[in-house]
Image: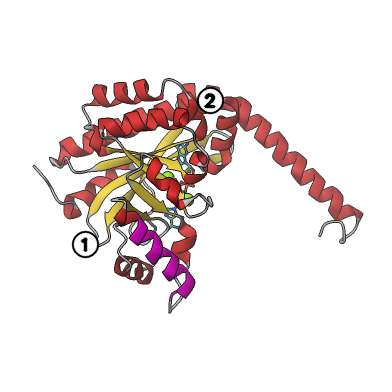
């Protein structure tokens, strides 16, 4: 398009690409000091039970409070941290912080059912310290392994061999839940699901979007129906992401999905917002 619009547009597009590359470079270089200076913070987005809207837990979503650019979302810096390996210490910090936070929620509300979800990137999966670090973080905090769910994208596990799956198997054996994030976008072999030590499928937001129109997109309805049937027959729970309207929530509830996450319920926010939500909605266990 830039080419058709003439030389000036083309140069402009080039300059823009240059500026983006320079910013990327600058952000990459700034990551280690940012971690040391404590510029990262976590927002938590509630996960609710679809059948009654009660709070099941929350997903930890990392942000960077950059002194010059303001708050940056993970899509801006996680890929950079992945490439340089900084994702390992950054991810460990997120895990530690989120687990500590979950334990605080439980203590404050006497509600041991509250759980926390933490995203793992492919580099973290390959890192030899993953299992030991996770066990240490859980032990230091006193959080039960069953209250932690690690989210791994479907694409990170495509073609995964036993060596890659071994740490996840060990974590699952300890009681940690493993969720397959962005499920349905990775073209994975469904039969492969049986091999994976996962207990939750997180259906990608693109399916939720198909439930927005009235009536819902019939193809998406069929697909979700099929995925839910398959998941439940394998004893996996189904979480849906990106629920923005009540109509979507109703449709997905009807299709048998178990838990949901999205702006309809709550945007990601400060940890104390979970307090107020869980106080009124969560079902206490002990
Ligand atoms: P994800 O794990 O699939 O997280 C869900 C994303 O959807 C989040 O974006 C969340 O803010 C957004 N979202 C939630 N509800 C809605 C909704 O109703 N509508 C729409 N349009 N969006 C919604 P966010 O926070 O920008 O995170 C993007 C991705 O960054 C995450 O996708 C995850 O893959 C990655 N990420 C976030 N935190 C971490 C982390 O600590 N470590 C790693 N490795 N990756 C992370
Ligand atoms: Mg996730
Ligand atoms: Mg997701
Ligand atoms: Mg997603």
Q: Residue furthest left?
A: 286
Does residue 224 appear to the left or right of 271 in the view shown? Answer: right
Q: Quadrant of the N terminus?
A: bottom right
Q: Residue furthest right?
A: 7
The residue range painted magenta reads: 216-230
Residue underneath mark 2: 86
- Disc 1 residue lies near ligand 1 with CB under 8 A: no
**In which quarter of the view is residue 23 placed?**
top right
- What residue lies at 23% left-to-right and 33% top-to-bottom? 103
Q: Quadrant of the C terminus?
A: top left
- What residue lies at 49% left-to-right and 50% top-to-bottom? 189
Q: Say how the picture is coloured.
A: secondary structure
Q: In this view of the protein, can residue 260 be seen by the observer?
A: no
- Residue 44 pos. (x, y %): 35, 44
Rendered view: 45 above or below 216: above
Instruction: Give the structural element (helix, strand or loop) at label 1.
Output: loop
**In which quarter of the view is residue 5 placed?**
bottom right
Callout 2 crowding tier (Cα within 10 Å): few <14, some 14–19, many ≥20 = some
Please name whichever residue, 97 or 162, is drawn nearer the observer in this view of the structure: 162
Q: How many marks?
A: 2
Please name whichever residue, 138 or 189, is drawn nearer the observer in this view of the structure: 189
- What residue lies at 21% left-to-right and 62% top-to-bottom? 52
- Residue 133 pos. (x, y %): 36, 22
Q: Main secondary structure of the magenta part?
A: helix
**In which quarter of the view is residue 134 placed?**
top left
Disc 1 from disc 2: Cα separation: 40 Å
- Residue 111 pos. (x, y %): 15, 42
Residue underneath mark 1: 52
Q: Which mark is residue 201?
A: none
Does residue 3 appear to the left or right of 119 in the view shown? Answer: right
- Residue 30 pos. (x, y %): 59, 26
Does residue 71 appear to the left or right of 106 in the view shown? Answer: right
């Amino acid at each position: 398009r830039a080419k058709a619009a003439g030389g000036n547009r083309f140069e402009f597009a080039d300059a823009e690409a240059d500026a983006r590359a320079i910013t990327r470079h600058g952000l990459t270089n700034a990551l280690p000091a940012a971690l040391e200076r404590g510029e990262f913070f976590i927002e938590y987005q509630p996960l609710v039970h679809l059948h009654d809207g009660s709070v099941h837990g929350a997903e930890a979503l990392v942000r960077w409070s950059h002194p010059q650019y303001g708050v940056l979302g993970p899509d801006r810096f996680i890929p950079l941290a992945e490439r340089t390996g900084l994702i390992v210490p950054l991810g460990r910090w997120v895990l530690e912080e989120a687990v500590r936070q979950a334990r605080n929620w439980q203590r404050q509300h006497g509600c041991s059912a509250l759980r926390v979800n933490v995203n793992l990137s492919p580099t973290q999966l390959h890192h030899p310290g993953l299992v030991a670090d996770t066990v240490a973080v859980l032990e230091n905090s006193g959080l039960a392994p069953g209250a932690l769910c690690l989210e791994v994208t479907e694409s990170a596990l495509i073609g995964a061999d036993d060596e890659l799956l071994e740490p996840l198997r060990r974590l699952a054996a300890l009681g940690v839940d493993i969720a397959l994030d962005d499920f349905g976008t990775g073209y994975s072999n469904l039969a492969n699901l049986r091999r994976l030590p996962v207990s939750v499928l997180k259906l990608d937001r693109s399916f939720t979007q198909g439930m927005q129109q009235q009536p819902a997109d019939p193809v998406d309805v069929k697909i979700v129906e099929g995925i839910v049937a398959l998941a439940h027959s394998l004893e996996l729970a189904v979480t849906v992401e990106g629920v923005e309207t009540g109509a979507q929530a109703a449709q997905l509830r009807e299709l048998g999905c178990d838990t949901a996450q999205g702006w309809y319920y709550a945007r990601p926010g400060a940890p104390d917002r979970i307090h107020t939500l869980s106080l009124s909605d969560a079902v206490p266990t002990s």
